[in-house]
Image (cartoon, grey):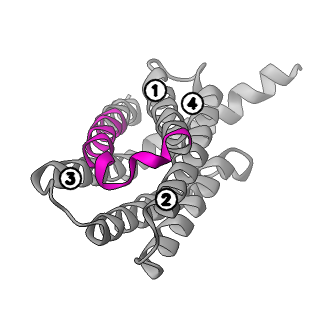
Amino acid sequence: MTAMDTAKPAAGIMLHALARNWWIILLRGICALVFGLLTFVWPGVTLVTLVLLWGAFALIDGSFALWAGIVGNNPKMRWWLVIAGLVGIGAGLTTLLMPGVTALVLLFFIAGWAIGVGVMQIIGAIRLRKEIDNEWMLIASGALLVLFGLVLFFQPGAGALGLIFVIGAFSLIYGVTLIAFAWKLRSHSHG
């Protein structure tokens, strides 16, 4: 039996756990959409409001990711969701507990969160690639997170207020990709 032969059943277990809890990914996508829409509805939002909105989003998103990792059946396959959840919760709590952070520190918090969670999503999608069709949706949302984080790291001088629409657009696209992936998992759970 090769490593690929043993990896396939393990990925199937992870897929089953994700499919059973598809609604958690759907809620993460809805949270991202709501956050994205709020940035466009309130374009004159202050930096403190942006900090609080993003902190709440990261905390809720991280909580859902952590929950998905905890309810999974295979501890070896769910670690990436637990790590992504803990990164999100940590970033959200740090942001909410220190709302007076500077725009530069806020950007680095957001960038670190985006890169960390994006990498975990890409790893998870790679593990599922032989088990599901259209795993590219999860890879795409992870790649968007990593790209978004890198842009924030290399362009911090633009400031948080100047990035409101970029953050909003990212959140909308990220939310749509997570919702599409959740619906794909939902159909898999009924199949």
- Label 1 vs label 3: CA separation? 22 Å
Q: Earlier in the sequence, mark 1 or mark 3?
A: 3
Which three-letter amino acid code belongs to the residue tagged 4? Answer: Ala
Q: Earlier in the sequence, mark 1 or mark 2?
A: 2
Q: Which residue is mark 3?
A: 39
**Residue 105 in picture, x, y percent from top left:** 52, 63
**Is 169 in front, or is 187?**
169
Please state the extent of the stretch shown in magenta in the rendering.
154-179
Which three-letter amino acid code belongs to the residue tagged 3? Answer: Thr
- Label 3 vs label 4: CA separation? 29 Å
| Residue 104: numbered disc | 2
- Label 3 vs label 2: CA separation? 19 Å
Q: Earlier in the sequence, mark 3 or mark 4?
A: 3
Is residue 94 shown left or right of residue 184?
A: right
Figure check: 177 above or below 113: above
Q: Earlier in the sequence, mark 4 or mark 1?
A: 4
Check contact, mark 3 vs mark 2: CB within 8 A: no
Check contact, mark 1 vs mark 2: CB within 8 A: no
**Residue 42 in picture, x, y percent from top left:** 13, 57
